[in-house]
Image (cartoon, rainbow, N blue to C red):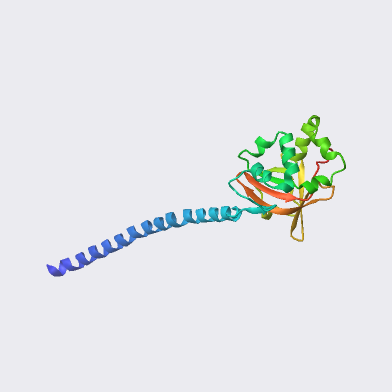
Amino acid sequence: MKKHFAPLLAAVATSLVLASCGNDKPATTETETTNTVNPADSVAAMAGDSARMAKPEGVMVDGVAMTAEKNIVENAAAAKSVSTLVAAVKQAGLVETLSGPGPFTVFAPTNAAFDKLPKGAVAGLMDPASKAKLAGVLKYHVIPGRLVAADLKDGQELTTVNGDKLHIMVRDGKVMVSNGKDTPATVQIPDVISSNGVTHVIDGVVLPLGK
């Protein structure tokens, strides 16, 4: 009798072992898929965000730290070298817009940049009667979205808030912006990160063609 049951017991034991192995494999594979795919995506996303994050100490402009907890207008108001721009933003009624959630990319001309314009040009733009024209010029320096210097490539054409194209050039590692015709303005201080976007300080005022 034992001789007859021995092969049967061996076959049953073998089947149980194989079944056990077969049941374990899919569970292991499913666990690995769940534990590896999503974290990998999260790490990639975090790396992309980290590459764009502001320096903890901020970016120095005129000896003042421009920090990420302030919005674009608040940071600009603290920098003496762009006081003409800040006054123009106020005159054009754009403070609320540029203090909003955005995000925005702003190419900010310095006071010296405004001084390069023909005599009387700034006074003319600041005239209350020229408010719409002033707003158009300022909006030509604003791009929807946040573009740090590394995002700006030679030959790019960016659509500004006023609807016109702003041309990007990169020469010897320096980013320049132009209307496609006049002498380009060069970025002097890049990547000033604010809570609602990024500002690049430039050495020229870029005027939209025909305006």
> Which residue is nearer to you in this view: 61 or 9?
61
For image coordinates 82% across by 37% down, the residue present is 123
Left or right of 146? Residue 10 is left
What is the x, y in percent for residue 76? 68, 45
What is the x, y in percent for residue 89? 72, 38
Rendered-image quadrant of the C terminus: top right
Left or right of 205? Residue 26 is left
> Which residue is nearer to you in this view: 93 or 11?
93
Splitting the image into 4 quarters, where does residue 124 fall?
top right
> Which residue is nearer to you in this view: 24 or 172?
172
Residue furthest to the bottom in view is: 3
For image coordinates 16% across by 66% down, the residue present is 5
Asked whether residue 178 appears in the rendered view, the answer is no
> Which residue is nearer to you in this view: 71 or 140?
71
Splitting the image into 4 quarters, where does residue 154 fall?
bottom right
What is the x, y in percent for residue 110? 76, 48
Residue furthest to the top in view is: 129
Asked whether residue 196 appears in the rendered view, the answer is yes
For image coordinates 50% across by 56% down, the residue present is 40
